[in-house]
Amino acid sequence: MNRRLEFLGEMGLAPLWRLRARDAPPAEEQNQAAPEFEAGTVSVAAPATAVPPPVVTLEAAPAAAAGADQRSLRIARLTLDELKAEVKACTACGLCKSRTQTVFGVGDESADWLIVGEAPGAEEDARGEPFVGQAGKLLDNMLAAIGLARGENVYIANVLKCRPPGNRNPEAGEVARCSPLLARQIQLVQPKLIIAMGRFAAQTLLNSDASIASMRGKLYRYQGVPTIVTYHPAYLLRSLPEKAKAWEDLCFARATVAGGTIKK
Ligand code: SF4
């Protein structure tokens, strides 16, 4: 890894995503040239394949829909305020014992864009907000690169509402118990597009065990909502070369929304 990037990373200054020289191009320009962007202060060559990849629409069966139980059916009828209260008091899995607080979600509750991540980490658990810390900063920079901002037509949530101890991976039972809460949250926000960030979010929403690499570049639907998959910002912090692929995914997302082929 570039030593300067490493140093900037240690200083908490990298990676920053910033369009250079001009604003994000209109959708019709995306087939001509991808804008350059910077990671930290080091220019990153524009991805050669920043053109949105071919769209393959796949309807995913939500995991929660299979074998819905009484709890799931009750949750599916809650209002947003009732859902917040449900999450706050939830003891449906063992994570309730170790959490500091639940992390419901943040942002515009009628946003067009919904970001779904994995689970709260230590900082999220302490602050009660998803995607804070370095990964949160990178997410904010990624959103800014396509003209979006946290809380402005963007809503951010996680698959799990409570922190797994030691930031371990979520367990299947925890994901299963928490999925009805996320499903209802998505129904209530009614986004135009979901971006599933990271393996757990993608696999949970799309009821798949496929890898991120194989799911990227395709347009899925979760409960009818167009859904795309990309890497989690925490992973991108550790794997800078993958940022070019994440940029492709963001271009794909932006083109999908701008293309007007999806309906709310
Ligand atoms: S992770 Fe989800 S299911 Fe488990 S206690 Fe927290 S809110 Fe409830």
Image (cartoon, rainbow, N blue to C red):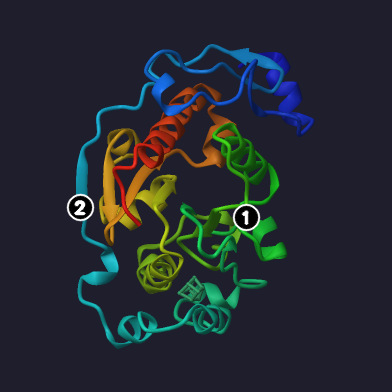
- Viewport quadrant of the C terminus: bottom left
Q: Which mark is residue 151?
A: 1
Point 31% across, 53% down: residue: 263
Q: Mark 1 or mark 2, which has the lower sequence index?
A: 2
Q: Look at discs 1 and 2 and give the one toward the viewer.
A: 1
**In terms of image quadrants, where is residue 240?**
top right
Point 35% across, 79% down: residue: 76
Point 62% across, 71% down: residue: 99
Tag 2: amino acid = Glu
Q: Which mark is residue 215?
A: none
- Viewport quadrant of the N terminus: top right
Point 50% across, 63% down: residue: 110
Residue on which disc 2 sits: 59
The spot of residue 121 in percent (x, y) is 61, 56
The spot of residue 187 in percent (x, y) is 38, 68
Q: Distance from label 1 to label 2 (Cα)?
A: 28 Å
Out of 182 and 211, give the one closest to the viewer: 182
Give the secondary structure at mark 2.
Answer: strand
